[in-house]
Image: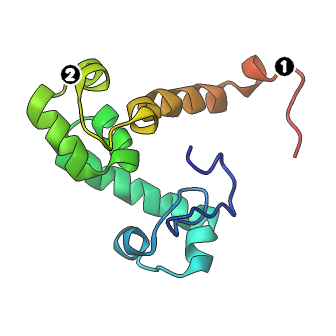
Amino acid sequence: MESSFQHNAHSSAGALGIWQFTAGAARMFMGNASAAARLDPIASTYGAARYLSHAYDKLGSWPLAVTSYNHGISGMLRAKDLFGHDFPRIVKEYDHPLFGFASRNYYAEFLAARDIASQPERFFPEGLSN
């Protein structure tokens, strides 16, 4: 969601591609930190799936794992220590300087993107074009 689904997205922090992998995260979850690999939508999607699986193993819930893609596993572990798996309460009450608007709304954006992808005709009755 951070890339607005642009395969050639570049961030000011050096993250690249549709999944916005930094070089360090790409080495860990893609096995290749090259710009070409991070810009490859297929390779980076496999890397994102590996990241999310790893995050789920650490955090024990999909809302926490998905949100960690924006806020980090350590940050979501801190939130989990305070509120357990009560995700609505985390969104409402977790107070951390780096848990701002983007992190707080990341899971809701993910769910919206999932719903649109699963029913594009409902949201785009005029059709889609490249």
Mark 1 neighbour density, 10 Å: few (under 14) some (14–19) many (20 or more): few
| Residue 65 in picture, x, y percent from top left | 31, 42
Vertical placement of 57 versus 124: above or below?
below
* Mark closer to the observer (2, 1): 2
| Image point (62%, 78%), residue name | 36
Q: Earlier in the sequence, mark 2 or mark 1?
A: 2
Residue sitting nearer the eye, 117 or 4: 4
Assign a secondary structure to mark 1.
Answer: loop
Q: Which amino acid, by three-letter code, is at mark 1?
A: Pro
Q: Which corner quadrant of the image does residue 62 belong to?
A: top left
- What residue sits 89% from the left and 40% below the top? 129
Return the residue nearer the eye: 106 or 65: 106
> How far from the left and from the top, in percent, is residue 76?
23, 42
Task: Look at the image and tell me whether residue 103 can be seen.
Answer: yes
**Residue at the disc numbered 1:** 125
Position in image of residue 2 (x %, y %): 56, 47
Identify which residue is drawn at 33% across, 32% down.
63
- Location of the N terminus by quadrant is top right
Q: Tell whether label 1 touches label 2 (CB within 8 Å).
A: no
Residue at x-position 40% and y-position 38%: 103
What colour scheme was applied to this rendering of the protein?
A: rainbow
Q: Which residue is mark 2?
A: 86
Percent x, y of residue 130: 87, 46
Give the vertical position of 107 relative to 23 (above or below).
above
Q: Is residue 27 left or right of residue 122?
A: left
**Dot 2 amino acid type:** Asp
Q: Quick check: 88 above or below 55?
A: above
